Amino acid sequence: MSSSIPLLEMRGIEKRFGDVCANKSVDLTLHSGEVLGLLGENGAGKTTLMNVLFGMYSADAGTVRVAGSAVSIDCPADAIAAGVGMVHQHFHLVLRHTVLENLLVGQPSLHGRLNKANVRRRLDEIGERYGLTLPAESVAGELSVGEQQRLEIVKALFRGARVLILDEPTSVLTPQQTEGLFEAMRAMAKEGVGIIFISHKLGEVLDITDRLTIMRRGEVVATLDNDGALSRRQLAELMCGHELEPPRKASAQKGAVLLELKSVGLRGHTGVRERLADVSLAVRGGEIVGMAGVSGNGQKELAEVIAGVIRPERGQVEINGYAVRNANPRMMRRLGLAYIPEDRIGAGLLPSLSLSDSMMLPRFNQHPFSRFGWLNRTAIQDFVREQVKQYGIRVSRHDVRTGTLSGGNLQKALLARELAFHPLVVVAAQPTRGLDVGAVEFVHSRFLELRSQGRAVLLISEDLEELFALSDRILVLYAGRVVGNLCTNGTSVSEVGLLMTGSAAEAV
C-alpha cells in the first residue's frame, strides 16, 4: 500500500480567517493505494485543510508535496494539474448536458473541435477498471443521485487525479449505492489512487479506511492505523475530546394524531410527472415517524406542503385535527408547527443578516421580541445567547453575520430557533446533515425529548442509521409515492434500502 515516498504530504499548514485559526501547523500524509479517513467535529478545520489542498484557499504557511515534489496550489486548476481531485458534497455538474459533455468541459480542442471519441474511450476504460460505468449519452440531470456522484468521481479520474478527496460521499446514497461506492474505492486504491474520505458516519469510516487522521479545533490530535481494534465510541471521544453518552429511546405513550395528510397530490413543473402522488400519512403525539428516500423523490416537496411553503393541488393537511386551507408558513407556525428545511441557507437562515436577526426573524413581530412595532433588542440578545449556549454554536459574538458560520453551526442555529418555542408538530428535513457526532447525539436527544413530551415528529432523512435509531415507524417515499410503512422493530436496513430504489412493495 505505502512506499518510501508518500503520495501526498502536507506539512505545517496554517490558515487564519481574521482572529480565527482554522488550521494550526497541520501535518497530513497519504500513501499510494491508501484510503485515509479525515475526521473531526464541525469547525475542526478538516474542510479548510481540504480547500487548501484543492486550491480553494491559499495557506498562510506550510508546504504541499505530491509524489515527493513540492507543488504550489493557488487555485483548483493548479490542484488538478498536480493530480488532486475533489468530489464535493454538492455536485458540480452541468445538469442539462450529457455525461460525455460534462467530461468535455474544460478539455482542450484541436482546430476548434473536441475529440469525443477519445473521451468516450477513456470513459469506458475508467468504467471497466473501477466499476464506474455510465451511459455516455445520458443527461446528467436525469441520472440518479448515485450516478451523479459516480460521474463526479469519473470526472476527477478523467482529469488524472492520483489524490481523490471525497467529502461526505455517502450522505445521499442508499446502503446498496454506498456498497457500490466502496467497491469502486477499493478498486481505485488497488490501482494506486490515494483517497481522503471525509465522513461523520463512523461505522462506514471503520469499514473502508486504512488509517485515520483526527482533527480538533484546527489541529491534528491523532493519526491511527485502522487495525480492527478501534470502536466508534473511541473515535467519537477523540473527535470531541470527552466521553459521549448516546441518548436512549425510552417507551412513550402515543396520543392523538397531530399531523395528518390525506391523498395529497402535487404535479411537477412540466405537469408530466407528479412530485407527490396521493400521499397519505399520520403522525401521533409521542411518535417519531421517519421518512426514507433517495434525494429527489418528493421529500422536499412533502415538507414544503406541510410547512405551508407550497400548496397542494389536491388533498388535505391537518394539524391537531384542524383542516388547513390556503396555508402559509405563518399560519402553520401559529398552529404549532416547527419546520426545519434541508436548505439551511436558501430556505432557513439569511446569510446577509446577523445571527441574532436570523434567529428571531420568523417571530420578529411577536412578544417578547417586539412591542408596539419596536424591536426589543435586549430580549433578542438574551434569546440568542441562551440558544448559543444550549446548542454549542461556535461564534465569536452574537452579531456575527450568519453567512460566516460553518455548515454545522448554521444547522445548530436553525434547530435552536425552531425548537425553542415548544412546537406541537416538528417536520425536520435532513436535520443532522453535516453535523459531527457530538452534535448529532445532542440533536437526537432533543427529538427524543419532544417524543417523550407527547409531540409529533416527522423526520425526513437519507441516513438510515439515524432513522432506525430514532423512529417508531419508517415510511419510504419513491417517485412521490409512499411505497412502504414499516415498524423499525423487525425491519432491516437492506429492506428499506431496496424500497428506496423502487423495488416493488405494497404501500401499507
Image (cartoon, rainbow, N blue to C red):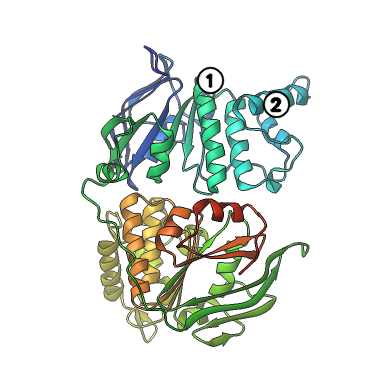
Vertical position of residue 271 compared to residue 143: above or below: below
Residue furthest left as drawn: 242
| Quadrant housing the C terminus | bottom right
Vertical position of residue 316 compared to residue 487: above or below: below
Element carrying mark 1: loop
What amino acid does circle 2 point to? Answer: Asp
Residue furthest top as drawn: 4
Rendered image: mark on residue 124: 2
Q: Is residue 264 visible in the rendered structure shown here?
A: yes
**Mark closer to the chain start, 2 or 1:** 2
Name the image quarter holding residue 37.
Answer: top left
Q: Is residue 347 left or right of residue 49?
A: right
How many marks on residues?
2
Spot occupied by residue 454 in the image (x, y as percentages of width and height):
37, 79
Q: Is residue 263 left or right of residue 260?
A: right
The residue identified by callout 1 is 191
Spot occupied by residue 238 in the image (x, y as percentages of width and height):
25, 42
Nearer-the-camera pick, 188 or 119: 188
Name the image quarter holding residue 336.
Answer: bottom left
